[in-house]
Amino acid sequence: MSARVLVGVKRVIDYAVKIRVKPDRTGVVTDGVKHSMNPFCEIAVEEAVKLKEKKLVKEVVAVSCGPQQVQETIRTALAMGADRGIHVEVSGKDYETLGPLQVSKIFAALAKKEQADLIILGKQAIDDDCNQTGQMTAALLDWPQGTFASEVTLEADKLKVVREIDGGLETIKINLPAVVTADLRLNTPRYATLPNIMKAKKKKITNVKPADLGVDVSSRLEVLKVEKLKEAGRI
Amino acid sequence: TGDQRHAGKHSRVISAFRSVSGDEGVSVGSAVREQHGRDESVHICRPPDVVVFPRSVEEVSALAKICHHHQLPMIPFGTGTGLEGGVGALKGGVCFSLRKMEQVLDLHQEDFDVTVEPGVTRKGLNSYLRDTGLWFPVDPGADASLCGMAATSASGTNAVRYGTMRENVLNLEVVLADGTVLHTAGKGRRPRKTSAGYNLTNLFVGSEGTLGIITKATLRLYGIPESMVSAVCSFPSVQSAVDSTVQILQAGVSIARIEFLDDVMINACNRFNNLSYAVTPTLFLEFHGSSKSMQEQVSITEEITRDNGGSDFAWAEDEETRGRLWKARHDAWYAALALRPGCKAYSTDVCVPISRLPQIIVETKEDLIRNNITGPIAGHVGDGNFHCLIVLDPNDPDEVQRVHSFTERLARRALAMDGTCTGEHGIGLGKRALLREEVGPSAIEVMLGLKASLDPKNLMNPGKVL
């Protein structure tokens, strides 16, 4: 199979960190705070690598948007088994206001440029909980989407996706090319082994700017304030 | 209320505690005290008078000074996952719950070391490390506090390859009974080896809270191996399973886990998980190494097992199949409990030189049958350590007595074979007499001398170990 899979990996504050709101209430404290790959993106990478190990796809490309540090996140994806990476450079104010609409435009452009057959994303990021990028990307490309996937099976040129929905599990069949978003029970991501981390240093990461893809990353949203929830009653 | 009356008795001390750790850092509520008076053993709950929740080593030291001044017993508490009743407050006193000190500090990837506070658990640390390719492999099963694992000198299924806590703690920060803060290898030091002075680090490893409160541990890390392969094999006898184990170790195969399940345990696992393993002694093996070498390691091992009469050798590299192969071993505790619903389980923990393992297991099984005790056996056969998972009705005094006598006979059987009464769980509350028999009067005198030197008022976890 000659299919190419694009996997999105987002660098977020690690899930185990206790989040603190900045005193000026413009956001949360990120300086010196542990960051790692968004857990749903880990599941997406694992699924793509599993497809490659089963020889159902030929190449897995890990993509991340952000400043220099996101290269660490791409390296983790490479250590898990992705073949190469693409770093879309976004920094400063543009990075602070980067959201699903701009990211989905970037992914749509990359999908065309890289001639991808499948895009796998995490269902949502644990920092903004938007749950929008996969759906927007599919809409921009006019591709079918299988969201909240807890099982994905490739059958010839179609994808059977079992989706987790409120009422239970829904099974759909969609044509390729398609967008899939990974839910929690899709798989258990592997830990990157030390030898594979060492080998991943030799894999290639190409840099590209949003402008090169014809994407405007300016935001139409303005964050007014970020506040801590009031504490629940104490006994 | 009862809680208020209880607080009244200790009010001066409690307000002193509150001025150190804040109102939320001190609790006299009965539910909280009971929660901190029990662990996962069969020993009854012995709640402390107060539970404090310090947030830093400075607070631990200040609280210890107050306790020392008022002659109050101090009991350190990590995750409460111990198996020997180590946290029971036999003389009341103050439980130091260390769960608020939960930072991973000072990770040095290229030096393979990390320092953790007592609230960091084994799984928590490995999750923190997941992007680095490093892990802390000592795996006692429970998601225990790493400092608690240091306090009990914990071990696990991986010990045959990676060692126990004794081999993997480089330095400890300990608060002594009088509040003194001690760095056992010197503050911040973390060389991979040292011959500087007395080995204080390993004095505190395994001291079970009787010499001080561990507030930091510097641990040795390992690279996550490129490949892990699991295998299962059945044997006609305990002897053939152990012979295979010895030969596998001698062959230099990169074995990481060798687990033994006896026929009673296999039967329990079959019933619990709807499996169909042959009801006979079985070995579960795991190999760690490079992908290229795995095939060879597995065939060497398969040949050894075949030469010893082993059969139904099955192996797998992918995570899903490995999980299925090992499910029997993973669920052993629950499978044992399921043999007699409504009963409790107690685990024995003797450890002998590997060559004596067949004899002790055979004699132990005869003892179990003779005394009508349900005791499936699971063991870390690569270390000579095995557990009888005894399932008993705690409300049947005759059965309780039979089990108690059995465990004493088992411990003495192990001692007679140059072994120990506890390979990994610790002495805690129930094995103090056995410790005397095991190490002898001179060693006990030295231990008592060390205890008197570090804790002359006997405030640190009184009634345990010695």
Image (cartoon, coloured by chain):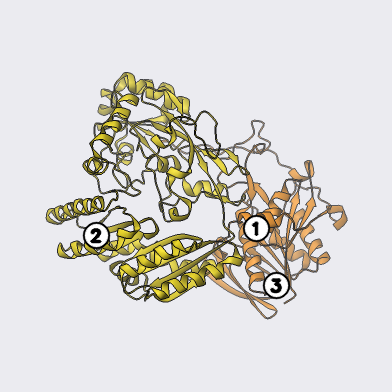
Which of marks 3 and 1 precedes in the sequence?
A: 3
In percent of width and height, residue A156 lies at 68, 81
Question: Mark 3 is on which residue type?
Answer: Val
Q: Secondary structure at mark 3?
A: loop
For the residues marked 2 and 1, what is the alpha-carbon distance in whole angstroms? 47 Å
Name of the residue lying farthest toward the bottom? A156
Q: Chain of mark 3?
A: A
Quadrant of the image containing the N terminus of chain A: bottom right
Can I make out residue B321 in this image? no
Task: Name the foreground residue: B435 vs B31.
Answer: B435
Q: Residues within 10 Å of mark 3 (few under 14, many from 20)?
A: many
For the residues marked 2 and 3, what is the alpha-carbon distance in whole angstroms? 51 Å
For image coordinates 67% across by 36% down, the residue present is A31
In percent of width and height, residue A235 lies at 39, 36
Residue B95 — which label?
none
Q: For chain B, what colour was chosen?
A: yellow
Circles 1 and 3 on the same chain: yes
- Which tag is nearer the camera, tag 1 or tag 3? 1
Q: Chain of mark 2?
A: B
Q: Are marks 2 and 3 in contact (CB under 8 Å)?
A: no
Say whether residue B119 is left or right of residue A134: left
> In which quarter of the view is residue B398 placed?
bottom left
Circles 2 and 3 on the same chain: no
Q: Secondary structure at mark 1?
A: helix
Task: Name the foreground residue: B454 vs B102.
Answer: B454
User: Which residue is denoted by mark 1 in the rendering?
Assistant: A196
For the residues marked 1 and 3, what is the alpha-carbon distance in whole angstroms? 20 Å
User: Which residue is denoted by mark 2 in the rendering?
Assistant: B342
Q: For chain A, what colour was chosen?
A: orange
- Which tag is nearer the camera, tag 2 or tag 1? 1
Question: Mark 1 is on which residue type?
Answer: Asn
User: Which residue is denoted by mark 3 in the rendering?
Assistant: A57
